[in-house]
Each structure stands twice: as structure tokens, then as C-alpha cells.
Image (cartoon, coloured by chain):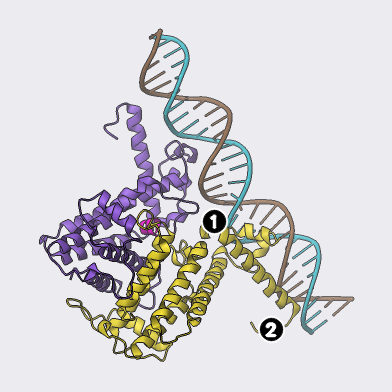
Chain colours: A purple, B yellow, C brown, D cyan
Amino acid sequence: MVAARTARERARAEITAEILAAARVQLGEVGPSQLSLRAVAREVGMVSSAVYRYYASRDELLTALIIAAYDELGAAAEAAEEAVEDRTDHVARWMATCRATREWAVSHPHDYALIYGSPVPGYAAPQDTVMPATRVIVRLVEIIVAAHGSGGPTDTARPPAGAADPSDVVADAMAFIAERSAVDLEALPELVMRTLMVWSAIFGTLSFELFGHLKGSVSDYEGYFDQTVLRLAGDLGLA
Amino acid sequence: MVAARTARERARAEITAEILAAARVQLGEVGPSQLSLRAVAREVGMVSSAVYRYYASRDELLTALIIAAYDELGAAAEAAEEAVEDRTDHVARWMATCRATREWAVSHPHDYALIYGSPVPGYAAPQDTVMPATRVIVRLVEIIVAAHGSGGPTDTARPPAGAADPSDVVADAMAFIAERSAVDLEALPELVMRTLMVWSAIFGTLSFELFGHLKGSVSDYEGYFDQTVLRLAGDLGLA
DNA sequence: AACAAATGAGAGCACTGCTCTTGCCAAGGC
DNA sequence: GCCTTGGCAAGAGCAGTGCTCTCATTTGTT
């Protein structure tokens, strides 16, 4: 990726990007399942078979789009989070991140469906997608940790009555966090459990909104989302 | 739908059902986006154009499949809930309903994707689908109401500090419940809010599991789901 | 028996993802 | 300088799709 040397490589990189850009435009119009490789080929003035020189298959093009979408969402969320001036106001940082996530989702419904909707047929997300996919949750974890580090409430540090110790089921998640972060959560399995739950809840809420499952139950989607993530913050001990 | 009179009507109903059955089989194998009307036509020994006498389009066939899936899921959840002998053990009834939901989902991943994944292109769920779609949530609401009616904790009856009154954003949901149930929730907007949140969280969790977003974070999916819904019950004041 | 409606078969259109062959043209070695 | 190599685009073609139309046949009613 560093400064393409030969003219050929440069042209190749340029055309590859051009195809991807055209695909992103088409995706914004028609949705993942309707994305046609032939149509994007027409858009960039090529014949369909020529595109296969750059993307081996439609799935490979979709993978590139998935990565782009994850990165765009991650960038939007991070930018919003960093715009919060009072870095000690963890709730504000939390809300900013969540709101930016929703705003990106509602303004890019097809991209959202691509990454958080049903996966394409026999599709298994390649390794390239996992890193960009973690950008938002990594930010959220940082906020949660910061809040708890600054002596916030620790109600969420122990499981509720009747619930088993969650250490086992979140072991992988804790290993994942420990691997790519200096944060030490070893002593807080319940907090990790709650974080995973909240993470799922946020995207469950967004999916319900975008996929029409709240139709008839909620009219003010933005207000509902706000109230939701505010309560989720409370459940994590942020409020 | 009552006892088809003429032989023709009977035959028509039978063939319609036969096509739907073949479609269900194919759906179980390949997933919604790959479902081919021509293939199911071959399966039932017809030519593709003949199928159009029974389903006007592929979307209409998908709609029939959606209704069937909602009904199957609803029936499975209801059966599991009714199998709980101690009707006063609201947590047990809650867990049974949730577990049955997950079990149906993991054993019918394509049907699940069809109803809770990204909707097909320009698809707007027809009115016929909303009734069967509410079966599970209606059961859950009944359990929640029963628990609160029997003098359970009412922590969830008021919004947390810093959160606004949710009456506005859940107004539609309350009207929806009031319309098709004798339950009076007028005084409990916060409980309705929490119910909606939990509802979204459950399906967010299932979607994350089935669509591969928990890969690397959770290995024991069943255990994680159990712990999740148990905590959600607690958040609703059931525990 | 005669008519009309419902049904199935087949051809065909426009589209898809993908493969293969053909010819072109520029980059690098002699 | 020429000439070979290799990347590249174009086109044809294959198998499949949803859907429409026409035509013949079956079925039910009058």
C-alpha cells in the first residue's frame, strides 16, 4: 500500500478504488442483495469481465464494501466521541458515541444492513473484517473502563441474585480485550458480561428500527434510541 | 379457509400448501436470498410459470414463508411457556419462553434470518405479518404483567436519574398493548420502555450469535444467552 | 352438449455471476 | 533499436434467475 511504484501498479490501485467507489454508490441505492457487479462495471465504463481482474468475485467486492462500511462507521463514532470536550463526562462521551452510531446507520441503511443484517449465503467474514469491526465497541469499552477507573459505582461488578458467575461464558471476550488493550478487567467478569449485553442491545435496537420491527410501537425513533442508550449507560454504572 | 367446497378449490389449496412446503424445505437449505422460485417449481414437478398461478411473485411467496416462520416460532415459544407447571414462577416462565425462542432460531437459522435479518430489497412487511409477529412478545408481556400484578418489585416503574419521562416515546406501544389486551399499563410507561428494550436486547443477542458477531468473544453461546436473559429478567423486576 | 373459467406447458425477455478466448498495448530484457 | 512477456479489456458464451405472454388442455357450470 506504500506509494505504488510502477505506473501499472498505480493505475491498478486507482481503478480498484474507482470500482469500489462505484460499488459504494450503487450499494447506497439498491441494497446488498441487489448489488450487481455488471451494473458497477457499466458505471465505471468497463465490461463485466474486466472487473474480475480487480475483484475475483462478487463476494470479494462485498467484503471490500464491508470493510469500508465498518471503517466509516468506526470513524464517525470516534470523531463524535472525541468532540466531547469534558473528557471526564463519561455519560456525554457514551451518548455521543451511541448517537453517532445511530446517525450513521439511519443515513446509510444499506451499509448497515450489509454489516449487521443477515450475512450473504455461505459467507464467512474473512479475517480482514474483524479489526475494523471492533472500532466502536473498543471505544465504548474505553469509556466504561474510564468511568469505573475514576471510582464510579460498582454495582455492576457482581452478578445479580440467582445468576451464575459469568466468568466462563465471557472468558473469550476478556482474553480478546486483554490482548489488544492495556486495560485490566480480570477482576470484573460481570462488567464484561454487562458490556456484551449492552453492545448487543444497542444493535438490536438499531436493527429493530431499521428493519421495521418497531413500526407501530415507536414513532419517535431518535427519542426512543436516546432513552434506550441512556438507560443502558445506567445499567453499566455510568450514570 | 373453511372446508373448501369444490374439488378445484380443494386442489388449489392443496397445491398452494405443497408449494409452500417445498419452499420451506428449500429455505432451510439455502437461505432467503438464494431461494429460487424455479427450483421449488422443479421440486413440486411444475414448470416455473405454473407457480405464478398460486403466488403472484417471489416476494409473495416469501411473505407466506415469513408468516409461517413467525407462527412456528410463536408456537414453539408458547408451548414451552405453557409447559412450566408452577404458573407463579414467573422467572421460569420467562426463561422457558426465551430459551425456546433461541432453540428455534439456532435450529432454523434461515427462517430466523428471513424474519429478523435485513429485509429483502424494497420489501415492506404486509399487514398479514404483524399479528403472527407479535406472538412471542405478547407472551413475554403477559409474564411481566403477571409478575408485577402479584406484587413484585417496582424498581422498574420509574425512570433512572437523568432520564426523561418515557411516556412520549412509548405512547404507540402502550396504545398497541391496550388495544389487544385487557392489561392496564397506563401507569407504567417506564415498564413498557424497559420491556421494549429487553425485547430488542433478546433479538440483538440472537442476531449477534447467528450472524457471527460474537465469534471470538463467546464460545458457549447457550450459556451466554442464558445468563443474558436471566439478567434481562432482573432488569424488568422479575427476579 | 356448449361455454367459460381455471390451469399447466413452453417460449421468450432481460437480467445475473462467472469463464474462456481473443486481441491489444505498454513495460522490461536483449 | 527491436522483441518478447505479461497485464489488460472486450466479447461471446454458459447456466441460472424472475417474470410475461401465448396456447392448449382440463375442469366446472349452465
- Kind of element beneath mark 2: loop
Q: Is residue A187 above or below residue B86?
A: above
Front residue of this view, candidates B188 and B51 = B188
- Kind of element beneath mark 1: helix
| The label number, if any, that marks residue B3 in the structure image | 2
| The label number, if any, that marks residue B34 in the structure image | 1
Q: Is residue A140 above or below residue B20?
A: above
Magenta span contains residue B8: no
Q: Are marks 1 and 2 on the same chain?
A: yes
Q: CA distance from mark 1 to mark 2?
A: 35 Å
Where residue B20 appears, as percent x and y from the top left, is 62, 68
How crowded pointer 2 is (Cα within 10 Å; few <14, some 14-19, many 20+) is rated as few
Q: Is residue B10 above or below residue C10?
A: below
The C terminus of chain A, quarter of image? bottom left
The magenta span reads A111-116
- Chain of the residue displaying label 1: B
Magenta span contains residue A114: yes
